[in-house]
Amino acid sequence: MENLVEIAEYGCEVAKKEGAEFVDVGVHSGMGMSVDVERGAVKHGDTAVSSGVSVRAFIKGGMGFTGASSLKKEDVRGAALKAAALAKVAQPDPDFVSLPEPSGSYPVVEKLWDDNIRGVSAGKLVGYLRRSIEEVKSVRGDAIINGGAGLGHSESAIANSLGIRASIKGSSIRMSTSVTFKEGDDVGTYFDFDNSRLLPDFNPSGIGVNAAKMALKFLGARHIQGGVMPVVFGPLSGLSIFRVICWNANAEDIQRNRSYLIGKKGAQIASDIVTVVDDPLIPAGMGSGPFDGEGFPHSRLTVIEKGVLKTWLHNSYTANKGKEKNTGNSTRGGTSITNTVVSLGTKTEKELISEIKDGLYVAVGSIFPNPQSGDISETVDWGFKIENGEIAYPVKNVMIGMHMLEFMKNIDAISSDFREEPGAIMPSVRVRDVRVAGGK
Amino acid sequence: MKDILEAIRDRAKKKGVSFMDARFVENESTSISLQDGKADKVSSGKSAGIGVRVISSGAWGFATTNETALKSAEDCLDQAISMADASAEKGRVVEVAKVSPVIDAVKAKFEIDPRSVPFKEKVDKVVMFESEARKVAPEKISNTIAGYGDIWQREVICNTYGTLVENEYVRTHTYIMVVTKEGALRQRASEHDAIVGGFELIRRIEPENFSVKAAKRAVALLSAKRAPSGMFPVLLHPDIVGLFTHEAIGHNAEADGVMAGVSILEGRVGQKVASELVTIVDDATIEGMWGSYKYDSEGVPGRRRVLVENGVLKGFMHSLETAAKFNAEPNGSARAQNFNNRPIVRMSNTNIQPGKQPYAELLKSIDNGVMLTKGLGGYVNPNKGQFTFSAGEGWMIRKGELAEHIRDVNMSGILLETLQKIDGVSKEYDPDTLKGGMCGKGGQGMFVGAGGPYVRVKELMIGGQE
């Protein structure tokens, strides 16, 4: 069997015959290639084929789950039989109602696959890396340069016992360069990257220069005095704040009674400048696709509007259990966000910084609150002190601690300028009155 | 399978590669996930395949296949050679240390083969652990997640030195997380246990020392205060000192990072990098420990490796490649998660060795500080030597005594500063506090253990909310 949908369909039939009441089968097949640089020279070339099948079988709501790395007919059959057998020992779950029904059609999401990526050779990846190495060396010759370039293309399919049949092809190409400068015990380090679904959109030119220039700026990091101060989260940091809170809004955590967002739907959970959309339909987006892990059609979802939490993120199980609309965020094991889009403000990042007398700038880093309590406790790995409206010097051993809801309400600006990556507009975000711990 | 790997090895020799190893890896795993009293997911997984690695034209090439026929393995070898040739750089020649060939077969050790235990018995055990936890405070427990997992793995390693090693292991683990609530406040606590071995682990666990303990801690945390913010004298409990050792020192002592120029310990062998109270050992040979193994994924025997002795950096953990680079003896530290991963340098069981002071004396010496326990996870930025790790809970220390209970909090430090600031190491010692630990370096999940004594640090950054 070469057709992935047929393989998935076959798995469904086998598990159904074995007594499963509901079944879905996911199948994928792909190929990846990567080349790595170590200390300024290309050193490794890897290539790998990957394939797999996973079967979910349900009996009275209890789920049996199996996975296998082979797509041979006998292995798919074995996985399906085992899933059905496991479903018999899983305990019944009355909250399980059904897997999704076929919807008729899927949205068209463009630019997810580029056949030309299959034609990119290892030699071409090496060429990208060598140019990046030269870029770094043009900034300063004693740089320690590591990094890699890679590509992948894959096809995946999903079929369920109610008639869902869907497949998708995806491709990607990526490169990253990491630069370290050492001056005695002092270390400055940074990285930059480019990734894309399509070959014409891939333009890694300049990331070596940027990584090197930024690494130099991180030399001479200092301990700072802690306190309560405004913090600007730069483009490689700001968007992650909104991605995390969308992820925390997954219905599973709410229904299981283990989230700090319980009771907050319809409530103001962020400042009124915050509007966030989970958008899986962005052409060429890295998180884009026409359907979710269960084959349910994707759609745009406003998660936060003017600071008000509008919805939970659902899969078919949580939607049925909560008697709410399925939002199409299933991963066939939970829920997940796709591409996160945040409404932009009116001032540039530079203007936001210029309004701060004493504060902190976070260049790279995420906020991950304790999903139960909402408490934040994070290290600033790449940060600068802001003094008198300007970036002053890099900092070390600095931490941020407060509650996520307080943090969200203290967002007082989102920049108008941004970094753009496939499926992501990444602005800077300013938060006032953040508790910062410093070691001075 | 051995005959296929040997055929590939002979073909590689004929093609004139400098070095080749081929690994066949197969896994079978089962897991049970239970939430709020129901076994809502019962899983099993299987994978098998071959990974072939070569040095050709002075560069590494690696290719994998999930087909286990000779033809697929031959194609895999050819792809690995062409990837290496495409990656060749003038002036760079990758070398590996020459080692004597090893021919051996390691059989899995267990009392009860988990594959022979019916699923129902596994489910019933987890249900029992979870229900005992719920009895602690039914009105306060809002969610429980309990789980069980076992994995059987066989790895066959064949290389051009003539090594032919078969590694077979069975590992079994279980965990529970309990979430409690009071008003809008929610807290969590978890416990886990794990061995290189079989279902005997589960049969000997008493809920009182496992799930009930997690529930009691989660209830107690409802009355705990938010952690403070700033620099404090810190007493690290053995429950967290293993995590500290792993993140703060262990990763920096992995020689692949040193070779890539991204470890703060580069060029410091023989230098004093820590207080003289500190001796750190990574030991793959401790019987039955989660991070133990007889041979690594290059077929080199695992060893006891002294990383730091009385504060002086003694050496690193090595693969064949890094051993050649640093002119060191290979010490069996290269492991791969699966057939489709390259072996990379990994820790095994990493410990700070016990000192001479009693715990009570260390506690008594702190006037205003923090004791932290229950490591949750962490990460390190090795080139800067800046590390972060999380504690599940702690206590304020006031005038030499444990005072207010505090909630989960992260800590951060700069390695070379923090190691010098260790000013107390207890004689009380637990070698295995990171039971069931997994390290995610390079995207490869790997079994690791860690532990140690109580360790007092003169000052450490606490990222609390108060």
Image (cartoon, rainbow, N blue to C red):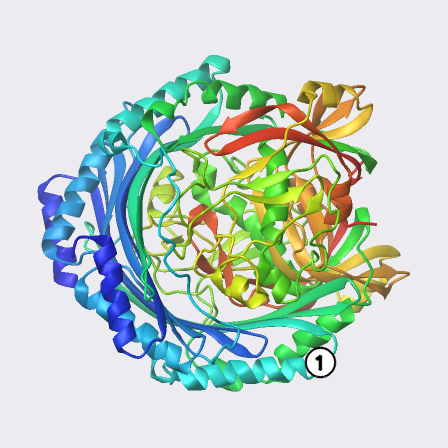
Residue A171: image x %, image y %? 32, 37
- Depth check, front residue: B113 or B105: B113
Question: Residue A221 at x, y = what percent?
Answer: 68, 28
Residue at screen point 73% across, 47% down: A269
Quick check: A420 above or below A316? above
| The C terminus of chain A, quarter of image | top right
Look at the image and tell me whether residue B354 can be seen: no
Spot occupied by residue B312 in the image (x, y as percentages of width and height): 59, 46
- Image spot of residue A210 (x, y percent): 52, 20
Hey, which quadrant is residue A37 in on the image?
Answer: top left
Q: Name the residue under label 1.
A: B138
Residue at (79, 49) in percent of width and height? B465
Please tell me how many numbered marks the rendered image carries: 1
Q: Tell which subunit mark 1 falls on.
A: B
Q: Residue at x 79, y 55 (%)?
A: B227
In the image, is residue B88 above or below residue A408? above
Q: In which quarter of the image is residue A418?
A: top right
Which amino acid type is marked by label 1? Pro
In the displayed orientation, state which residue is furthest to the right: B399
Work out whether residue B381 can be spotted.
Answer: yes
| Image position of A54 (left or right of B210) | left
Q: Which residue of the protein is positioned furthest toward the top in this rendering?
A: A138
Q: For this view, does A123 lie left or right of residue A195?
A: left
Q: Is residue A87 left or right of residue B154?
A: right
Q: Residues within 10 Å of mark 1 (few under 14, many from 20)?
A: few
Image quadrant occupied by the N terminus of chain A: bottom left
Mark 1: which secondary structure? loop
